[in-house]
Each structure stands twice: as C-alpha cells, then as structure tokens.
Image: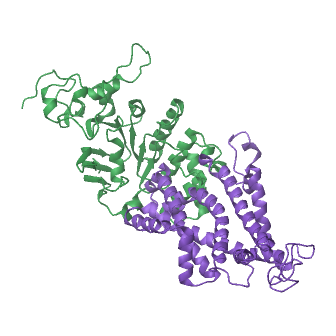
Amino acid sequence: MTAPLLDIRDLRISFQARDGSWADALCGIDLSLEPGKVLGIVGESGSGKSIAMMAFLQLLPRGTRVQGSAKFKGQELIGMPASRIQRIRGKAIGCIFQDPLSAFNPVKTLGQQVVEAIRLHDRSISKRAALKEAERLFELVAIPQPERRVRQYPHEFSGGMRQRAMIAMALANKPDLLIADEPTTALDVTVQAQILDLLGDLRAELGIGMVLITHDLGVVAGIADEIAVMYGGSVVERGPTDPIFYETSHPYTAGLIGAVPTLDGTGALKQIEGTPPSIFSRPDGCAFHPRCGRAGDACRVQTPRLEPHGGTACACHFPLTTLREPVPS
Amino acid sequence: MAMTSPDTAGFSPRRRFEGTRDIWRRLPITAKIGALMLLFWILTVLTVSFWPLADPLAMVGRRLQPPSTANWLGTDALGRDVFARTMYGAVWSIPIAVVVVACAVLIGSTLGALAGFFGGWSDSIIMRLVDVTVSFPPILLAMAVAAVLGPGLANASIAMVIVWWPIYARLMRAQVLEKRENEHVEAAVAGGAGSLRVLGVHILPLCWAPTLINATMDFGQVVLLAASLSFIGLGATPPSPEWGSMISEGATKFYSWWIAFGPGMAILSVVLATSFLGDGLRDVFDRRSA
C-alpha cells in the first residue's frame, strides 16, 4: 500500500456561537486518499463536506477552531504557518469552485489570470511563456481556439467553458491533488456530463488525485473510486463506490440513493422526511435518528461509530443488512 | 483588447467595453456640458498667459468702472481688470483642487482599503480617526487647521486634504468590505495569492468607480472651500487673483456688483460642471445607485 496523498484523522471544526459556546461543524472525521484516486464526498448542505476541505487549506474565517490532523504527502497542514500553506495552495493542491463566474476576477482576461496563477508560484517563467502554457492548458481542457480565448474576459465565456477554464487554472501548476467543490452544480445537465468526463480524462492522463465534493450521488457514481457519505458533521458511510451503491448499509445513504430519479421513472421519488439539523441543535446520539425510519432507543443515546459492515464502513446501530435488534451493550 | 477579429462578432453577443469613446457616448447631455466646461477651465489654466488679456496685477484704468467694451467685467477698487483677474484666478483654483483631491483620494483610499481588508485593530484605529475628523464641520476644521498653519495657499491645501481624506477612506473601506466577500477573492487565496496581492490585484481594480464619481463631484466642492478660505483671509494672500479673495474684495463694494460677479460665476461654473459630470459618470459606471 502506497503512502496516502491525503490523510485526515479525527478532524474537528468548531464555530463559536454568539453566546460564546462552541458548536461542532465537523465532529471528528477520518478520510484518506491514495495518489491518483478519486474520493467523492456526498452530503446535504450543511453536512460539513466543504468545510473539511477548506479547513486544511486554512480558508476558514479567523476564530474557527480546527483540531485533529490532515496530512498531505506526509506534511501536517493543520497549524501550518500561513507563509508555507500559501505555497501549497494553488501549487500542489488545486481548487475548483462551484460557480465559475464568481470565482474569476471579472476585470482581467482569463489568460492573465492563468498567467498569474503560474507566475505566483514560479517567477522564473516569463509572461510570454506562461501565456503559451495557458493556451496549452485551455487546449487540454478542450476549449476551442485557445489562443483567442485566453484574451477574453470571464463574462464572454459560457458556463461550461468557464468551468473548463477554471479547471485549466487549477491544473496550471501540475498539482498532485485537485479539490473540486461542487464543480457541476451551477451547470446544465449536459454540460455537467461533459465536465465530469473531462475530470475523468484528466485524472487518467495526469494521474492526479481528486476530492470531488457534491450533493449529487449521480455525479460521483461514474468517476469516484471511493465515496464518503456525510451527515450532520460526520462521515456516516464510507467505502469503495460499488458497495456504497449495491451493498448500502446506512439508512441515510439508502435514502439518498432512493431520491435519485430512475430511468424507467415509475412512481414518485422517495424523499427523506425532515431537514438536516442545525449545528447548534444537533440531536444526541445518532444525528440522523429523528429522520430515520429504523431508529431505536440506542440511536437516541449513543453516537454510532464507523465500523466495517458488508463492503463498506458504516456508522449505524441498525445497518440495513442486519435484522433490527438492539445492539448488545 | 480593441482588436476584435471579425469572427468574434457573432460569437460574443455581449458588448465589449470600447474605452473612452464608449464612456463619452453613454454620458447624458448635462454631463457632456459639464465636461466641456471643465475642459474650458483646464485649457484656461494651461494657456491663459498667452491670451491677449490685461495684466491681472496692474492698474489698467480708473477704479470701480462698470463693465464696458474695454473692461468686460469692469475694474476693481484698485483699477485692475476683473475679467483678466477671473481668468488668471483659474490658475490658482483649479490646480489646487486637483492636488487636494488627488492627495485626499490617495491617502483616504489607501487607509480605507487597509482598514477594510485587514479589519481588526487597524480598522478600529483608522475608522475612529475618520469619525473624529468628520465630526467637525468641514469649513470649521479647515479654518482651524489653516489658522494654525498660517495663511497661504499651500497651508490651505494641507488643511483641505485633512478635511477631505476621511470621505474617501469610508468609501473605499465599504467597497473593499463588499468585494472582499466575492468568491473570486477566495479562489485567489486558494490559488496561493498573498494578502497584498489579493488586495491589489483582485479587490482594488473593482473598487475605483465610486471613488472616481465622488472625486469628480468633490472637485467643485474643493474649489468652493478653497475660495471660502481665501474669502476669510486664510488662503491666497493679496494681490494674487484668487476667486475667493476677489469676492472678498467685492463684498465691501456692494454697489460695484461686477467685482464679485466674475469670480462668483467662475466658481459656480466649476461646481456645476463637476456635479453634472459626476452625476453622468455615476449613470455610466455605477448603475445600482442611479
């Protein structure tokens, strides 16, 4: 087994409420990613999927408490001084954001912005050479007429093209890890498929590891090697992609899969009743129990731990493939 | 980026920004008039010494003569030509306003941008300084500072900068606070850009429009304040043909209305011109508040 590219251990993030108490946005998660693999992180809004990534890049607002460990190629990122993390951001770790229009500086051409991204980390490259590289990157992400497109402004690009440019910029410094935070959420369905294909191709060509954050199971199904499902600040189920879909253990994962439209389109989509809890009023025990059809007494009291179950690891007292009986205490 | 190849015409439907000509075309008619009036004064400043005018400091005729073909705006109490003095007055007032506004914008914007971007104690210190400064009526504070420094246009200019910079500090701070939350700023940080680079490259280029609009409008106000300081004897010293001091001289000769009329109209035209132009620029650059 190779050394993991990214190794997150017991990462815990807390925000301070107005009354001074601390609320956990992330209650100690473990995740790891091998080089060249794709990890999909799936969850509803507020489940903590994005802030986990923002935490180790130190992009969270000041006053956020981050505990635990996140190692990138063996280096501890949590608590790393700003000057060193600045050299990793955009160099070894590239980021793709949800809305490619607002993620670009509106008053500079895309070429200028890619040039800046390159020269920020290597001053020895001339502007001319960097612009050539920008054109090559645009070509790599299948933007037609790259030599003309690098001279255009973000508003002159369509949504899909803009996301391609965003990916090109994230790839500018040949990162080892690409973090894509809902890269397709702001795009049309057909364009979504194109962008996902592109990400899949790039991963095969360049061998970069990816973390794909999304709320759409369909997005990660085709591309991820591993999936982590998050709910209420914890990873509730984790495993290789196929077992997540075919040997689902956690009721929440099952609920998400049940909410995906099927091709034959028979019957109404199943929804998960209720809404996710706010981080300030998370229920005791399993965070999912108020919305769970299988919840028993143990769920209200004891927080389940992530344990191997079938093909995945699952944090549930009553995983789906077992009979509903109380856990032996 | 004006070189658009022909094939882009159908490709990017949104209009490209075509530079100064484009701005001019979009300005309302009042703003165009304002711009032309301002241009007239600037040209006057640059060329007035070549004009066939009477010497503004020399006695050219009898005292207190009403307007005539020889002296278009009459003569003042010392027999100097009021029209010539009014034109030469621009050489004092306009450059002072330019320098004062430029310094105030530079100082105020820099401090405001730092306050907005870094927040914390730097924000508190700078903005409390702003609060203290704006809590005095501008003319009173300018008078106090000018009185301490002593009369003279240079000291009056310093006084006006001290009065004016807080406006730009507040303006820039508000802009930076707003633009700082843009996602592209976070994206730049995630790309490895340092604080000063984020501020200079990704925030400030988006913040200049309100400052430009305000600076244009303030230009007239500074001319007015400079004249006010001279009027009460804290600005230009006689015999220099400064508009404020000319009005001051005219104020004692109530029945010789023409002495104050020339400089008065000059001040009026500058203030009006900058207001018109500033309003027009706001229509072009900042549509939210239009």
Q: For this view, does A246 lie left or right of residue A327?
A: right
Task: Specify whether residue A4 is in view.
Answer: no
Q: Which residue is drawn at 30% across and 30% down?
A: A244
- Total numbered badges shown on the rendered structure: 0
Q: Quadrant of residue A273?
A: top left
Q: Between residue A239 and residue A255, name the one nearer to us.
A: A255
Residue A196, given in percent of the width and then of the height, sits at 47, 36
Instruction: Judge left or right: residue B133 versus residue B221.
Output: left
Task: Between residue B143 and residue A223, name the one nearer to us.
Answer: B143
What residue do we see at 60% from left, 54% from top?
A107
Residue A87 visible in this rendered orientation of the protein: yes
Q: Which residue is drawn at 31% across and 55% down?
A: A63
Which color scheme does this rendered protein use?
by chain
Give percent across and percent down for residue A200.
Answer: 46, 39
Q: Where is residue A227 in the image (x, y as percent from the top left)?
A: 33, 36
Which quarter of the image is occupied by the C terminus of chain A? top left
Q: Is residue B91 left or right of A320 when viewed as pictured?
A: right
Residue, far left:
A329
Q: Name the residue: 53% across, 77% down.
A: B144
Question: Residue B50 location in percent, x, y?
Answer: 86, 79
Residue that extends furthest to the top in the rendered view of this protein: A266
Image colour for chain B is purple
On screen, A194 above or below B274? above
Q: Is residue A174 above or below residue A296?
A: below
Q: Any idea which chain is the green one in this picture? A: A
